[in-house]
Amino acid sequence: MTTTATGPACALPATETAAGGEELWERAWAARRALGPRAVILGHHYQRDEVIAFADVTGDSYLLARRGAAATEAELIVFLGVYFMAEAADVLKQPHQRVVLPDLGAGCHLAETADIYTVRDAWDQMAAALPGRKVIPLTYMNSGADLKAFVGAHGGAVCTSGNAQKAFEWALSEGDAIFFFPDEHLGRNTACRLGMDPSDPLVWNPRIAELGGLTGDALSEAEIVLWKGFCNVHTAFNVRQIEEHRAADPGVRVIVHPECPRPVVEAADEDGSTEYIIRRCEELPAGSSAVIGTDWNLVNRLRLRHPDKRISCLKEDICPCVTMNRIDLPKLTWCLESLAAGDVVNVVEVDEEMRRQGRLALDRMLALG
Ligand code: SF4
């Protein structure tokens, strides 16, 4: 089973790299207008301003994948996001649609902490160490299509940061234990929402060949085993930053994403998905202040959208997600002009068997409500 991608990872013709911002802006809009309803452009909340302006729909990865499939008049789904998101859109798309990612090198650090070979090996070791125990695999949306297919084929489901608690509850009702990958921190924060102690979940370290560094005895009693993976953006936040913001503004509301480490979530006032964070910023009364622990591009847009509130990033000098930022105006211009000229570049395509099994895992998530 493979995913195929056709097109350059990042190389651009000289006409795009040499052009100035205004010229590119005009060219990109002209190409977008020429494409008309044949294309729908989906933009993840963490994308740069210069490209998110072209999005017909903005949202998190799962919402966008569904909206792409729902835009049935569009034969082209241009995904402004990272690779696993384009794959998910391809899993859910209609048969006549094709998914295009303007930069095929836009990966995700977190998704790449778990590959199918290492996960399969861990699964086999776990099965051998735990005869008779039913383990349900769960994968975060931020994972490759091959991992979603693996989970689908083994009776598990996908989850998002917005429904992880429901997915964990479902999995524990279906089996004896959960094997969750790739984000250790989302997994621990979700376990805590279920009333567990932060130290209860075991952590499988894929860099330790034998049983991920665990023992058979420990595994035989575990309810939750977490893959040792992390997002390099959300692990840049720490408790000291929260303390400094509170010292400067005792009334400030601290809202963080659950990909942050447990101590950060515990020190914050609340945590939730990107959609949750956006909604909470809308709900806060005028004149209030909030610091947000998630990608800087989103926080900056929230700041501009709510001039009546003081919204800032928990770490103002944070480097925005490097892979999300790979899609910029030159690449988008090149991509849209190519599509408008009939050259369908940078197609991301999941093979049929992987699509079928990945869809099973996504449908199980959907069934959670
Ligand atoms: S912010 Fe983190 S999880 Fe999101 S795309 Fe970037 S590396 Fe991946």
Image (tube, rainbow, N blue to C red):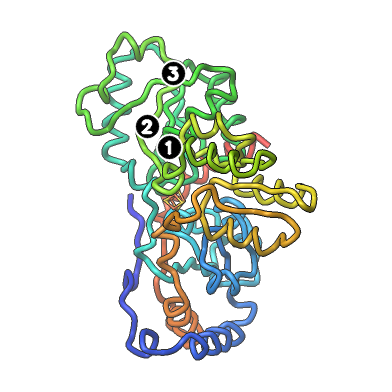
Give the alpha-carbon distance from disc 2 to disc 3, as whole Å: 14 Å
Location of residue 13 (image quadrant): bottom left
Contact, mark 2 vs mark 3 (Cβ under 8 Å): no
What residue would you read off at disc 1?
183
Q: Is residue 356 visible?
A: yes
Depth check, mark 2 against mark 3: the one in front is 3
Q: Position of residue 31 (x, y in %)?
A: 54, 86
The CB of the residue at mark 2 lies under 8 Å from ligand 1? no
Residue at the extreme front: 248
Q: Amino acid at mark 1?
A: Asp
Q: Residue at x 58, y 39 (%)?
A: 247
Q: Are marks 1 and 2 in contact (CB under 8 Å)?
A: yes
As shown in the figure, which amino acid type bears the numbered disc 2? Trp
Helix, strand or loop for disc 2: strand
Residue drawn at (71%, 46%), measured in percent from left and top? 280
Which residue matches tag 3?
199
Name which residue type carries label 3: Ser
Q: Are marks 1 and 3 in contact (CB under 8 Å)?
A: no
Name the spot of residue 9 as percent of width and height, x first.
Answer: 32, 69
